[in-house]
Image (tube, rainbow, N blue to C red):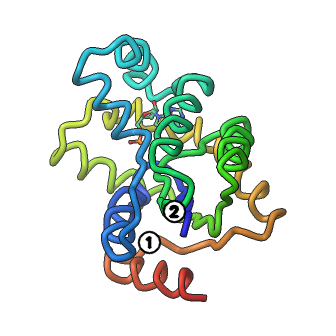
Amino acid sequence: MRIVLLGPPGVGKGTQAKLVAAKHKLEKISTGDLLRAELANRTELGKLAEQYMRQGMLVPDDIVNKMVAEKIASLGPGAGFLLDGYPRTIAQAVALEAALQTLGANIDKVIAFQSDENTLLERIRGRAEIENRSDDDAQTALNRFRIYQQETAPLIDHYKKSDLLIEINASGDIETVNNLVEEALAG
Ligand code: AMP
């Protein structure tokens, strides 16, 4: 099974990604986590990415595409995985399709989480207190919303066209949302 999780910042993608990956024994590929690891290790890639991440901007497509293509290739052709936070632009979706094609693989399902903006901002505020993420402050969070609307939301139509999309209301608690995800995956 190869799954893509889509959704605005604060929607709970990361939390659901962990639950789904553990239950279905899928490799979780989170570009945010991969980039934060590069940053923590002070690699060249990490230093470059930091400038964008600090402002809540997207790291350039070519950098992220290469990072994900390498990760997917390293898993081997038969591996199941779950993408959390990638693709985030149409160009990334196209690159992902190309990377999968070279492996003879494809995406099975795209789950798009939705919630209203107040709930999302509330969750981001809560996460900022717990995790101390530097990109969760109010201004950066708003930036990330704007970029989501501009760059990432068009992926919903992109995946609707290929009939892979399942939309889920993510306003409920973790368990409620997870039940919806499991129903969607079973269907
Ligand atoms: P996340 O943990 O998914 O919210 O990602 C944190 C930050 O990492 C984002 O605000 C971006 O700066 C960067 N990032 C993560 N995934 C991507 C991606 N697919 N494309 C570009 N930038 C990304």
Residue shown at 52%/38% (left/top)? 68
Where 26 falls versus 92 (above or below)?
Answer: below
Q: CA distance from mark 1 to mark 2?
A: 8 Å
Residue to which mark 2 is pinned: 116
Amino acid type at image mark 1: Ser
Q: Nearer the viewer, residue 185 or 77?
A: 77
- In depth, the one of 52 and 143 nearer the eye is 52
Amino acid on which the number 2 mark rests in the picture: Asp
**In this picture, is 3 found above or below 47?**
below
- Which residue is rendered at x = 41% and y = 85% of the image? 179
Q: Within 10 Å of the Cα at label 2, are there few (<14), some (14-19), or many (20+) other Cα atoms?
A: few
Whether tag 1 and tag 2 are in contact, CB under 8 A, the answer is yes
Pick the residue in front: 180 or 164.
164
Quadrant housing the C terminus: bottom right
Q: Looking at the picture, how far across and down is residue 51, in whole percent?
A: 41, 14
**Residue 132 falls in image quadrant:** top left
